[in-house]
Amino acid sequence: MANPTKTLTKNSPLPALDAGATRLYSMRFCPFAHRASLVLAHKGVQYETLNIHLGNKPEWFQEKNPNGEVPVLETDGNIVYDSLVVAEYLDQVYKKSPLIPDDPLRKAHDAMIINYNGSKFVPNYYKILGSKGTEEEPITAMMTALEKLEDFLAARKSTFSEGDKPAFIDFMIWPWHERLPSLKKFEQVDVSLKKFPSLKKWYAAMIEVPAVKTCGFSVEMHDKFNIAWKGGDPDAFDVGLDQ
Ligand SMILES: N[C@@H](CCC(=O)N[C@@H](CS)C(=O)NCC(=O)O)C(=O)O
């Protein structure tokens, strides 16, 4: 299981960080933080994780990120936050197994898809998760976003976005796709991907990627978190850890 430490809360002291060590401020079920941990795992970076209770944040956390959000990366007092910024920064600092293509046009096209996913798929995912009954509008909008991703992957004519190995886009959009099957618990969403053969192939390949295996959770665990979070359980962020 990824990041098996309990969340720090309002009065938790800030643990010291050794010189040269890298720390990720996270929350085990946060898909944005998941982006950062995927890149760290893919690059084989040694790092420690501090999980933050997002409903009762440590007093010092605002100083790490004025937005009050995870993920935040810290090394020797240098702070980087915002998942896409963190992921791109990591790709530039750790040259091993590069993720972002060198070609500026390719890089621009990839960024457009990541942004599309961020503005069309991600918000509808949350609308569906947060909705009370069967609401058609976000489901239709999410299916349209999936169609666009299907067309994108089909046009690339490869299993992953850049060939036979996962690249930047794959890791940046994966966290919500890992969580997609969990929506079935909450809404009548067809998560079988049968209408999306390229996405289905991509999904099957992604779950075999070592970084995905290291950082991910099972559908059952996402279900448990989603149920606890939706139900307002104050211990939702620590679901699956010994109380
Ligand atoms: N744009 C940010 C979004 C991060 C984000 O929304 N993180 C959520 C957890 S999944 C968070 O920290 N929420 C705390 C809050 O809003 O108070 C990123 O890409 O890193």
Image (cartoon, rainbow, N blue to C red):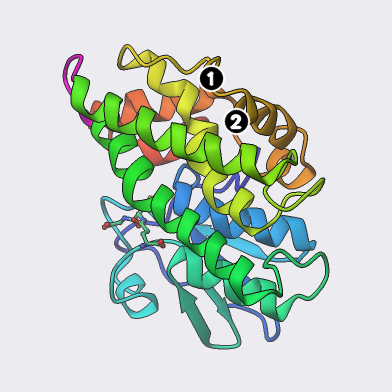
Within-10-Å neighbours for mark 1: few <14, some 14–19, many 20+: some
Residue drawn at (31%, 17%), measured in percent from left and top?
186
Within-10-Å neighbours for mark 2: few <14, some 14–19, many 20+: many
Q: Amino acid at mark 1?
A: Leu
Contact between labelled residues 2 and 1, with CB atoms less than 8 Å apart:
yes
- Give whichever of 109, 95 is nearer the camera: 109
Q: Residue 176 in the image: x percent, y percent?
A: 47, 39
Q: Give the residue number, with chain letter if any, for mark 2.
A: 199
Q: Residue 151 in the image: x percent, y percent?
A: 54, 37
Q: Amino acid at mark 2?
A: Leu
- Give whichever of 170, 101 is nearer the camera: 101
Kindly tell me whether residue 16 is visible in this rendering: no
Residue drawn at (52%, 17%), measured in percent from left and top?
195
Q: Residue 42 in the image: x percent, y percent?
A: 75, 56
**Looking at the image, residue 240 lies above or below residue 149:** above
Residue 203 appears in which quarter of the rendering? top right
Residue 153 appears in which quarter of the rendering? top right
Q: Residue 117 in the image: x percent, y percent?
A: 42, 48
Indicate which disc, 1 or 2, sits on the residue closer to the N terminus: 1
Report whether 26 appears left or right of 187.
right
Q: Main secondary structure of the magenta part?
A: loop
Q: Which residues are magenta?
A: 130-135
- Give whichever of 36, 68 is nearer the camera: 36
